[in-house]
Amino acid sequence: MKWSISQLNQLQHKGLSIDEYVDVSDIKDIDSTIRGIDPVHVTGRADLSSAKATFHLTISGSMTLPCSRTLVDVNYPFNLKTTETFLLRQTLDYEADEEEIHLVQGDVVDLLPIIKENILLEIPMQVFSNDQHVEGAAPQEGKDWVVITEEDKRNQIDPRLAGLAKLFEDKKD
């Protein structure tokens, strides 16, 4: 996903459409919570001029993350859209809209670091597995403890107030 500035200038009149699968498996070295990632499908187009190249990208794929509750592998699909602008010539009069602006280092525009950055930003704080009783999962109960859901917690009566419930039952009889 690299183009030289001269290649982009040649494609200025034709336009550039993107439809590629990119291997970003080395992203696991950056974030250790990613246990695996499939090749990412990148589609989109580029609006090219002599001063800038604006890429409108859709990045979709699937990564394996640990469940926050049981630590089993959870497949997490993602689909994100981004617009990235590269300034081909450094001009001070360019005003930024809502898009990201990147200065070209050397004479090559490389989208791979931008794709990796967007994937890292897409990682959620918590992921939960639908199946809590998978082999190899963290235990859900032990001696004198058990994991409870929020609904169980709401329905549970505080043991300090359990005596009051008996008091009201006696008055009804």
Image (cartoon, rainbow, N blue to C red):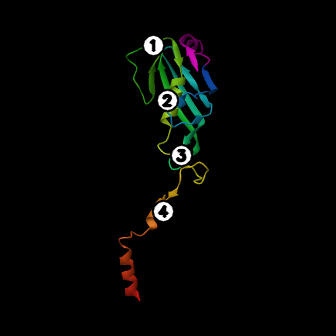
Residue 37 appears at what percent x and percent y?
59, 34
**What residue is shown at x 42% (from left), y 28% (from top)?**
97
Residue 132 appears at what percent x and percent y?
57, 53
Q: Quadrant for residue 60, please give it.
A: top right
Q: CA distance from mark 1 to mark 3?
A: 48 Å
Q: Amino acid at mark 2?
A: Ile
Label located before the other in sequence (1 or 3): 3
**What residue is shown at x 62% (from left), y 24% (from top)?**
17
Q: Which residue is mark 1?
A: 89
Residue 30, label in figure: 2
Residue 79 appears at what percent x and percent y?
57, 37
Residue 36 appears left or right of 157: right
Q: CA distance from mark 2 to mark 1?
A: 31 Å
Q: Which residue is mark 3?
A: 71
Does residue 88 show up magenta in the picture? no
**What residue is shown at x 58% (from left), y 21% (from top)?**
1
Label located before the other in sequence (4 or 2): 2
Q: Amino acid at mark 4?
A: Glu
Q: Is residue 62 above or below residue 12?
A: below
Please state the extent of the stretch shown in magenta in the rendering: 1-14
Q: Estimate how packed mark 2 is, as few (under 14), some (14 to 19) or many (20 or more) residues with alpha carbons within 10 Å.
A: few
Name the front one of labels 1 and 3.
3
Camera-side residue of 109 and 166 = 166
Element under disc 1: loop
The answer to whether mark 3 and mark 2 are in CB contact below 8 A is no
The mark total stands at: 4
**What residue is shown at x 49% (from left), y 45% (from top)?**
126
Q: Which residue is mark 4?
A: 151
Camera-side residue of 37 and 94 = 37
Element under disc 2: helix
Q: Amino acid at mark 1?
A: Arg
Q: Quadrant for residue 26, please give it.
A: top right
